[in-house]
Image (spheres, rainbow, N blue to C red):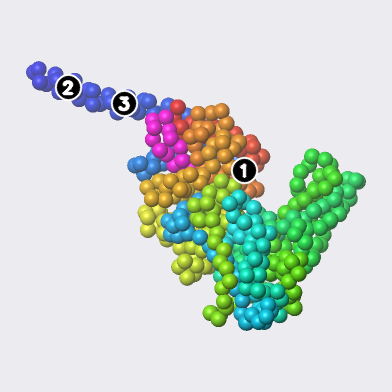
Amino acid sequence: MRNFHIIKIVLGILLFIPYLSFSQKTPSYQNLQKILEELEKDTLLKNGYLGFCLKNTSTGQIIFEKNSKKTMLIASCMKLFSTATALEMLGKNFTFKTQLAYKGTIENGVLKGDLYIIGGGDPTLGSPDFPNQPNTSQVFANWTSNLQKLGIKEIQGKIVGNGSYFSQNATPAGWIWEDMGNYYGSAVYGLNIHDNEYKLLLQPSKVIGENAKIVKTEPILPFLNFKGNIKTATKGTGDNAYIDGYAMHNDRFLSGTVPQTDSFFIKGALPNPAFTTAYLFHQYLKQKNLKITQEPSFSYETMPDSSKIIIENTSPNLTEIIREINLYSINLYAESLFKQLGKSKNNEKEAGAIIQNYWKDKGMDITGLDIGDGSGLSMKNGVSAYHLAELLSLMSKSSSYEVFNQSLPIAGISGTMTNWLKSTTLQGNLRAKTGSMKGVIAIAGYFTNAQGEKMSFAIIANRYQGTYSQMRKKFEKVFLAMQMP
């Protein structure tokens, strides 16, 4: 009988332990559920959609979900797929190359032939984003120095920008007209320069409603044809101006408004960076009194083996590039990785399928997953909260995890998460990539919960009304609830 009582006591304890665990966790999860249900019914999402997924990265278990398999637009959270897959397939030390070469002969200080700038897909060439890398002027100065070492004082030929490394049809499928032509819609080409951007300097009118005057572009690009106009709006209204235009076409269409001020500039996307690189270097050499007999040109034909390499430029490594992508959400760099992933498998146009199949082989259920580009601008993208949380969970077990994790913005501290969760228990704890476009907001990343467990999460809202700031406050309530304080 004594043994029987002992058994009853032990069984009672065993039954009570899971009750204790459940009791401790249930209120927090109930709170999370309540907040998500309230958000789904909120007027901001009256006509919209919400998806959420929370995973324990150690166990791979989905802890909580709501509409987690619904496919949605995720804007710049698409960069998580690009950067994670690039680290996995290309490696953290991968670099892009750009070459300066010539065809012909050098006789008595004269290059009898053409000078070629051969792109290798590097999106960072001449970019100001990397303090330890040369800017455009420094790149040109180095190239000029190497021409001088060869004794070249005249080119009886032309400078050719060669962009054959990637397809000339640069614009990803699903990009919309309103994005193309603006700096954030810069497509990536085989040869790129200075983030494929230029500044359009404007002088707003002293009369509200009148056209702002075009002063110039920086750099000077006389081949661009600006049509339409930008109106002057009241002071403090901000940049509401747009530059539209297709790749490989020099016509640029202006619309929108800029605030009334002494001067203002907006940024546009270069329509043909291969030509622009050749043109700008041509102008630079002329200023250095090096004679060139023919006008600059461009080509998307594969370079013959007969060309002679003068110098090769190397990009920052993939670790540095990925940090810029995820921290500051740079579309151009993400697109370059996307195309490189396709090229690494000899099929640039199938980059999306290559990425999907890679993660399928790692165990992801890719049902409903559609990847149309590398940056998130494409309307052909379709991703669920599950896909994002699963990607992050799988990456937490990768040898590339530390590099990937360190690239993500920190809540309340850095990058696109600087203004999120300030003065909360998640400041400095949560790392995440943000994504936003009209009617779309998505956040996905990692945090450590109150029990010390590493978690991955994703939350997406599509077709929401109201402002980004309003949605941010709603999402922050979800994040604090999922931490299980």
- Residue 167 in view (yes/no): no
- Mark 3 nearby-residue class (10 Å; few <14, some 14–19, many ≥20): few
Marks 3 and 2 in Cβ contact (< 8 Å) = no
Q: Is residue 176 left or right of residue 234?
A: left
Vertical placement of residue 41 versus 300, above or below = above
**In the image, residue 449 lies in the stretch drawn in magenta:** yes
Residue type (three-letter) at the residue carrying disc 3: Tyr
| Quarter of the figure with the N terminus | top left
Q: Is residue 206 left or right of residue 238?
A: right
Disc ID at residue 19: 3
Please name the residue that numbered disc 2 is placed on: 8
Disc ID at residue 464: 1
Q: Is residue 137 left or right of residue 56?
A: right
Q: How much space separates mark 1 and mark 2, taking CA atoms?
A: 56 Å
Secondary structure under tag 2 reads helix
Residue in view at x 54 percent, y 61 percent: 314
The boundaries of the magenta stretch are 443-457
- Mark 2 nearby-residue class (10 Å; few <14, some 14–19, many ≥20): few
Secondary structure under tag 1 reads loop
- Residue 230 in view (yes/no): yes
Residue in view at x 54 percent, y 36 percent: 411
